[in-house]
């Protein structure tokens, strides 16, 4: 097998990263990659623990002169978001990620890359394997299912992990040292479905909204990109108001924490309304294209005739569906007044699914202020009460609060200035990191989060900078060297 990344530095980092791209590691499917990490530890004669939930903890003693230095926990998650171009034949459960080197960037051919968070795993493995890097005692913590609710850290046995400092490597901007993150919760709406027999005198169409950029619902939520599920709601409302459509099916998005870049609906209309139907769709194609001409310029709405529709939503279900799609909060809700440019609270409706007995709306609510997270959920509950739906909250995770004083953060700022001649930025992030849980699991230890430049995560355009990876790895090694 050709090693696409073999010529790049740091060799060990890219060697391990390429190996990871050949191992299935979608959230919930981490057995193979977990076993791979256990074998790696044993091959390097390192102490290893594989938890029942498949978290892996590897311990390495400090090098000579560092035996009594503070213990550092290096942490990343082994799972990845599996998203691909809609028309691409690719199976994340068995196919290797198709790597492409494009100048300074590592890309793929239409799939997510998994640099979030595979590059952290690769960096930590390179440090554990090294025989000549000075470092304090290390605990490497690789968690599972971070992307789908942080199940790994939730199920972490605190008896297996202890340390004085935690360095999370799940950030995506070089030169930024994160010291705080948002908390979040998975908000799921269940709308009961009442079915009616389809009217055979009507004709069926599938409406597809596609071509959107999508993106990470935390990192890119402030980019004003369109959400295909919300666009679908606007279009369905307009069609129902003007020509009284029947709806047989709705779907959209792929992951709750990814901005929905596609959506579909199967509708039925009177034959005499066909031209008007097409006119309304064309009108909204122009509206959406104008509204998002800069932020999301390639939105398209496609129509395709559909036959054989057997049933459609009852009137109450149709009205409830459209009401939820139109009223549910989406996008930035509040901005921080303490940290300039920081999104304080948001919601992303990420997945829309039609099932036999219900329509499911899966959203990711985020906030760095706990009460604002509750406020968003309360508003969604009000919508549910109005339409007879049920709201469920799953995988609630805490925010990571900013600390005014942090010696490890100060050391990192100093090392960054020494190495690169410029100031590192200490910042907060509107995304969920596992750091919020670590305080509960392993105590109120010092924590920071860093990472190289990774772009368009959770999309098929995800890519990572080779040179930035090298700099961040060397920076991390120097920080470890100075913790004595």
Image (cartoon, rainbow, N blue to C red):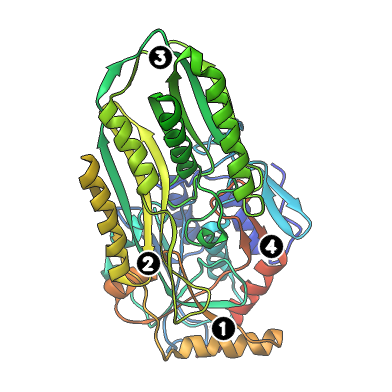
Per the model, the C-alpha gap separating discs 2 and 1 is 30 Å
Residue labelled with disc 4: 465
Per the model, the C-alpha gap separating discs 3 and 1 is 63 Å
**Mark 3 or mark 4, which is nearer the start of the sequence?**
3
User: Quarter of the image holding residue 418?
Assistant: bottom right
**Mark 1 or mark 3, which is nearer the start of the sequence?**
3
Which residue does the image show at 46% across and 30% down from the upper left? 239
Residue situated in front as seen by the camera: 184 or 301: 301
Q: Are marks 4 and 3 in contact (CB under 8 Å)?
A: no
Per the model, the C-alpha gap separating discs 4 and 1 is 21 Å
Quarter of the picture containing the N terminus is: top right
Task: Estimate how packed mark 3 is, as few (under 14), some (14 to 19) or many (20 or more) residues with alpha carbons within 10 Å.
Answer: some
Residue situated in front as seen by the camera: 223 or 25: 223
Compared to residue 410, the image places residue 63 above or below, namely: above
Q: Are marks 4 and 2 in contact (CB under 8 Å)?
A: no
User: Quarter of the image holding residue 312?
Assistant: top left
As helix, strand or loop, the secondary structure at mark 4 comes to strand
As helix, strand or loop, the secondary structure at mark 3 comes to loop
Tell me residue 160's x, y (percent).
Answer: 30, 68
**Mark 3 or mark 2, which is nearer the start of the sequence?**
3
Which residue does the image show at 36% across and 37% down from the upper left? 322
**Mark 1 or mark 2, which is nearer the start of the sequence?**
2
Mark sitting on residue 479:
1
Query: Which-is-in-front pick, marks 4 and 3?
Result: 3
Residue 175 seen: yes
Residue labelled with disc 2: 367
**Mark 2 or mark 4, which is nearer the start of the sequence?**
2
């Amino acid at each position: 097998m050709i090693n696409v990344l073999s010529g790049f530095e740091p060799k060990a980092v890219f060697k391990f990263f390429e190996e990871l791209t050949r191992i299935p590691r979608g959230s919930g499917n981490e057995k193979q990659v977990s076993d791979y990490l256990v074998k790696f530890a044993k091959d390097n004669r390192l102490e290893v623990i594989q938890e029942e939930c498949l978290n892996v903890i590897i311990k390495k003693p400090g090098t000579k002169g560092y035996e009594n230095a503070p213990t550092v926990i290096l942490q990343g998650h082994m799972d990845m978001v599996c998203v691909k171009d809609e028309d691409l034949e690719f199976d994340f459960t068995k196919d290797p990620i198709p790597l492409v080197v494009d100048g300074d960037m590592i890309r793929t051919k239409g799939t997510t890359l998994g640099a979030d968070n595979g590059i952290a795993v690769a960096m930590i493995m390179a440090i554990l394997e090294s025989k000549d890097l000075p470092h304090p005692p290390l605990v490497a913590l690789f968690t599972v299912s971070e992307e789908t609710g942080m199940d790994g850290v939730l199920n972490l046995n605190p008896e297996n992990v202890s340390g004085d400092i935690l360095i999370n490597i799940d950030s995506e901007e070089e030169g930024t040292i994160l010291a705080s993150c948002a908390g979040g919760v998975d908000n799921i709406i269940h709308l009961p479905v009442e079915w009616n027999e389809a009217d055979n005198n009507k004709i069926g169409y599938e409406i597809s909204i596609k071509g959107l950029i999508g993106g990470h619902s935390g990192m890119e939520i402030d980019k004003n990109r369109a959400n295909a599920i919300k666009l679908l709601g606007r279009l369905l409302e307009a069609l129902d108001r003007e020509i009284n459509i029947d709806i047989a099916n709705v779907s959209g998005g792929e992951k709750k924490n990814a901005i929905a870049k596609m959506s579909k609906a199967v509708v039925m209309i009177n034959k005499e309304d066909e031209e008007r139907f097409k006119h309304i769709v064309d009108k909204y194609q122009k509206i959406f294209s104008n509204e998002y001409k800069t932020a999301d310029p390639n939105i398209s709405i496609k129509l395709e005739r559909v036959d054989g529709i057997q049933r459609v939503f009852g009137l109450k279900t149709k009205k409830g569906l459209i009401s939820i799609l139109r009223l549910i909060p989406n996008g930035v809700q509040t901005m921080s007044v303490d940290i300039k440019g920081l999104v304080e609270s948001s919601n992303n409706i990420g997945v829309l699914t039609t099932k036999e007995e219900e329509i499911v709306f899966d959203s990711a609510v985020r906030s760095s202020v706990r009460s604002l997270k509750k406020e968003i959920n309360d508003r969604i509950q009000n919508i549910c009460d109005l339409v007879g739906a049920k709201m469920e909250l799953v995988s609630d995770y805490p925010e990571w609060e900013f600390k005014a004083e942090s010696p490890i953060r100060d050391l990192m700022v100093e090392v960054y200035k020494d190495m690169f001649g410029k100031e590192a930025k200490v910042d907060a992030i509107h995304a969920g990191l596992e750091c919020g849980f670590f305080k509960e699991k392993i105590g109120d230890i010092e924590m920071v989060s860093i990472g190289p430049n990774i772009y368009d995560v959770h999309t098929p355009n995800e890519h990572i900078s080779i040179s930035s990876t090298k700099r961040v790895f060397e920076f991390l090694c120097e920080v470890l060297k100075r913790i004595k």
